[in-house]
Structure formats: structure tokens, C-alpha cells
Amino acid sequence: MEYEKCYVYEPEDHRPAKRRKVEPQGLHGSWNVRREAYETAWGTQEAQFNEKLGDLNANAIYKLTTFLDEATRDSNPSGIPAAILSTGPEGSSSTGVIDQLSREQNAQKRRVFIRISASTGTNLKALLKAIIQKATSRQDGIDDEDEEVTTQKRGVKLLNYDLQLLADYVSERQLEQVAIAVGDTEAFDSDLLSDLIESLGYWHDRIHIVLLLSVATSASSLQQRLSRAAVTCTKGQLFDVAPSDAQIEGVVETVITDSSITWPGADLMNLVLERQSDYIQSIDGLPLSLKYAHMSHYYANALTVFLIPDIKFADIPSDHFDALRNVDSFRQHCRHLLDNGQGSQVRDLLESNSVLFTLARHKIRELQTRLDGMMPVINLLYQIQGTLQGYSTLPTRYLSKLYKLAMSGRLTSDASLIRSMLLAIRKSQPEIIGFVFLVCSTGFIRDPYMSRFVTVRRDINRLIGQAAEENQELHSADHVQNSTLRTTIVAQKVELSKQKATLSKRDEAYTKLLRQFSDLLEEYFTASLIDPKAFPFHELVVYDLRSPYRETFTPRPRQAIERALAAPHDYLDCDCCAPDGADGNGEATLSASQPATAVLYQLYLESGSLINVSDLRQAFLAVLGDEGRSEDENIALFQRALAELKCLGFVKGTRKRVGHVAKVAWRGL
């Protein structure tokens, strides 16, 4: 083997044992059915998400497409056409627009779309190299089998960052335009961005280049950061991209308006929106977050098999009914039945699976119907508040906040939000009431309240028409302008009292109709707004578990590693590693039976910033003691444990002192 360059490896003919196909059992027995149910339920909702995001970005994409087409028709531009995308503080709002625009533009046969960011390169050569590589790669719709870049012309070998390569590629393929999207220009070094624009400006007469610059601050701030030569060689135009708040509200509106099988709970929706705001990510991440929560609900919860509309009693295993009886809402329902003296019904639910199946299907369908009817009411509240916003002192409300209040059971007719809105309606002028009627008549109010609403609207419109014919104004008795303060002195004390102004009969009729309208809305809200947690089996319809979502999107691996090393008993669950104390709640102590890395980590916690390896080894060997291992084996365990701590990032080598290691991380930081 010392002189041979290769050898033939001939393994023995040992066929691996056949793997036996293990069928899912227990609560996992319904896995295949639940997976199909999830794909069916989420497919419709995902399509609506994509349609809504496309509608939100449609205006900006249309303007950008027109800008690109006009730049293509300009055969002799005075500078590089630059579209400045104003994204606001949350610069990620332009990501969805750029992604959708790139998908549409890549379908064009004679246009190349390139995206770069601050992480693409740290110097000009790296940026130019990345632009050339992305541009010369195969584009969709270009009918050419040659994917190689032309690296030589007239016998001269070109460097990989020479823009002549891109010019030759554009000329050979007869491309009309090269669009370069620069995301988050604030993250670029000012000099680097200026040098890039200047370099591209020298070639814009041979390469039809268009720039798409995303700006989170303002166009004037971008102009101040760029050099004078870079500003001179560009011809910019400002575009306003849909703000992130509007996009988030659009996604939430899709959740509300869609008639679905399940709905996200208040806690989960709050966690999703907080993550969206804290990390300032693209709006495309919000539907993906909801998708993962939806998937976790179907995959991790075996009881979602009861949500399948056409499920039969014979298709559900018996152990699923045992799990259903352990749901908290079912126990509360049984306790309520016992308090009402219906013990026989509770006995049937506990003993008969068919009776439990019938009750579960009925309660689930009832809750789905009530939630489906509550969503238009939430949208109606949002629309009315938006209408009254400029004419009253109502606080600004978002659709997402109203949804969270409704799913938590705090949005009822007695809530201060609804009471203040109804009071604002009673004080409204006729022109404002006309807008409110327009909102209510777009399908938000349902029977049997719709007929009463039509009657009230007809009577108020008749009064408004009569007052307009006589050139008079209608006033409500509840309006502040129709009340005056009266000052009286009694026993040398000043007393203030409100006195209503004298109203005409038409004003009194108008006031009476407004109160009827507000009472109708209050009755409608009382009947429609519910607390989902008050219904049995609400855990199936409203998925509100935060643990799988939080562990996936905001994991804490360092805390888990520190806990595993400091308290290995929590993971190994063995008696030898148990903490002191009869109740097992004492602090973890050093023991030779614990893993070597855990022992060394606990010694590491007691050390300073510089650790003497020799002292650490002596302490480690003293803890292990004589457990039937030789000294060489104990030293090998020490070396492996120290190597694992170094791999985990707890220690590192140091040149300050020979034979020492430096502590890198402290517990809890």
C-alpha cells in the first residue's frame, strides 16, 4: 500500500436485512388521513393569500413595468434609468414587489433581471463578478443551448469582472435590457455603491442597464450618500411601494374573509405578528408562518381527524376517542352537565364512542358556523371605524388587533371600543351616516337584521332628502353642539349643568332613528360576537399552541445545551444523575456517573476567565475517581470532553499563558 497508487476494494457479499415496513399505530394511525386533510384545507387558503398579495402589489408592479418598457424604448438615454423604491422604515416591504416583478420579467425573452445585496460582495470586483455571473446564466425563455460565458475576444482573455463579458453576452443574445435590483441601499458602503453606479454608467450606452434601488429613508438621503459623478450618470424616478402595515392587514383580511375549517387563535396570531414586526422580514414570510402553524395543528394533533367533513365513525380508531375525552373543554362541558343534573348524558359520553362522535361533530360544526358568521362582523367594525375616523375621536384600530380581541373573547357589545363607536354614530351628521350606511349595505349585515336595517336606512334617507329640499340641516340631540353649559350660583357655590337646545320635530325624528340604528348594531354585535373558548372542542377548530411555532421560528439552542450539560438528569432521566434531595428538586451535583462533558462543564462554570488545563484535568480525574477505568481511559475522556466544549464554543486556545484555555461564554448570556 505504500507504493501502489490504487487498490481494488472488494467487500464481502453481505446483504442487509430486509426492513420491515412499520405501519403507524395508536394516535399516529390517522396520520395519512390528516395529511391529506391538511393539504386540501391549506391549498385553498394559500391560493387566496397569493391572490391578495398580488393585488396589493399590482399598482407598484404596473408602474415599474411601464418604467422598464419606457427605458427600453429610449435608444439614447442621458443616464442610467433608476427606479427609486421608497419602502419606508421597513425596507423588507419591497422584497415581495421585487420578487413578483422578477418572476414576470424573467418570463420576457429579451430582458435579464438581476438581484444584488450588500452581502453579495465587499468590493467592486466581487459585485461586478456577481452581476456578470447572474446575468450570463441561463434565463427562462431564451432558446439557446450554450450556457458558457464568452471569455475571449480577438485573442484577448478577459477577467471575470470585466463588463465587456456582459456587453458581449447582451450583443450575442440580442437582449433589450439588463435590470439590476439593489436591495437595502442603506446597508451598502457609500463609496462602494457610488463606484458601482459609476462603473455601470460607463457602459450604459452599450448595455441597456436599468437600476432598481430600494430606499428605506428618502431619495434625498440616497443622493447625499452617493458621489456627484454617480448622481450625474443616473436618471432617477421615485416609486412608492405598498407599506408593510397595509400588506399585513391585507393578509389578515384574507384570514378573516376566507370561510375555512380552522382559525388561528389570539395568542398565536399575536406571536406571528410580533415576529413579523421584530425581525422586519418580507411580507411573504407571514403566510409561511401561518402555513407552518396550520401544518403543526394537523400534524401534531391527532384529534384534527374530527375536522374532516366526510369522516365516518368507523374510520376513527378507538384511542382517538380516549384522547378526545381528555380535552379540557370536554371536561368543562361534562362538569356543566353535572351541575345541571344531566349525569346520564355524561355517562353516555364517557362510555359510548358513538355518542361522543355525534356530540363532537355537532359542536365542531356549530363553532365553525359561529366563527364564520363572526368574521364579517369584525370586518364591519373595522370599516365603520375607518369611516368615523376623521369625524370623531375614535382611536386608530387595525384589523389584526380586532381579530385578536375577537378570538380572545374580549370583543363583545359591552367593550369600550364598541360603546364608543355606537356613541359616535348617535352624534354623527347626515353626510357621515350616509357613508356608514354604504359600508353596512355591502353584505356585512345578515338576516334577520338586514330587513330592519333597510327600514331604518329608508326612513333616515327620507328625512335627509326633505331637509335638503328645504335647505335645512339635521342635528342629533346627542351631538355636543346641541347642548350648552348653564352656570348657576347657589349658596355662594357655582354649579354647572347641561341644557339641551330646542330641537325641531324633524331633528327629534332623526335622533330617534339614529338611536334605533345604533341599537340594531348593538343587538347584531351581541348576537354575532362570541368567545370561542366557551365552546366544547374549541381546541380543534382554533389552533392556538405557541410551543411548536416558537421552538421553530425563535429557537434557543444555547439555553438547551447549557441546561443539558448542567442538569443531564432532565434529559437522561436516570437515577445515577438525579440531583440531591429526597424530592429530586435539589441542585445537580458532580458525579462520576454523569457524562464526561457534563462533569467538565460544571467544573468550567466554577473557573475564571483563564482556566489552567492541568488543574482542570486534576479536578476532573478527582471527580471520576476509580470507577473501573484506567488512568489512560480517564485522560481520554477528559480530552474528548474538552474538545466537545471547544466545539460548542465555550473555550478557546489563548497565547496569554501556556497551558491555559480562555473562557468564551458565560452561562445565561
Image (cartoon, helix red, strand yellow):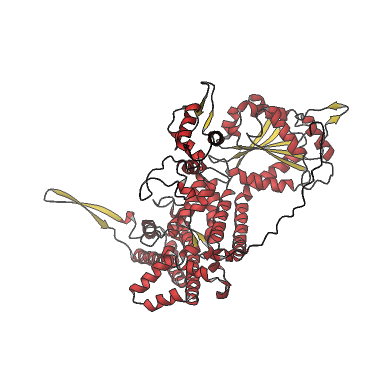
Task: Name the outermost residue toward the left.
Answer: 491
Along the horizontal axis of the image, is 77 left or right of 90? right
- Above or below: residue 588 compared with residue 407: above
Measured as percent of width and height from the top left, residue 57 is found at: 62, 49
Q: Is residue 123 left or right of residue 140?
A: left
The residue depicted at 81 percent of the width and 28 percent of the height is 158
- The residue nearer to you, when weighing 498 against 1, is 1
Quadrant hosting residue 452 = bottom left
Point out the residue furthest to the right here: 154
Is residue 259 visible in this depiction of the protein? no
Residue at the location (63% across, 62% down)? 22
Q: Up-down: is 349 above or below 234?
A: below
User: In percent of the image, x 57 and y 63: which residue is there?
Assistant: 28
The spot of residue 377 in percent (x, y) is 46, 63
- 354 or 418, nearer to the observer: 354
Count of numbered circles in the view: 0
Q: Measuring from the top left, give residue 499's x and y in whole percent.
A: 25, 57
Tell me, yes or no, if residue 420 can be seen here.
yes
Decide: is 476 above or below 110. below
Viewport quadrant of the N terminus: top right
Residue 394: give x, y in percent of width and height.
40, 52
- 294 or 243: which is nearer to us? 294
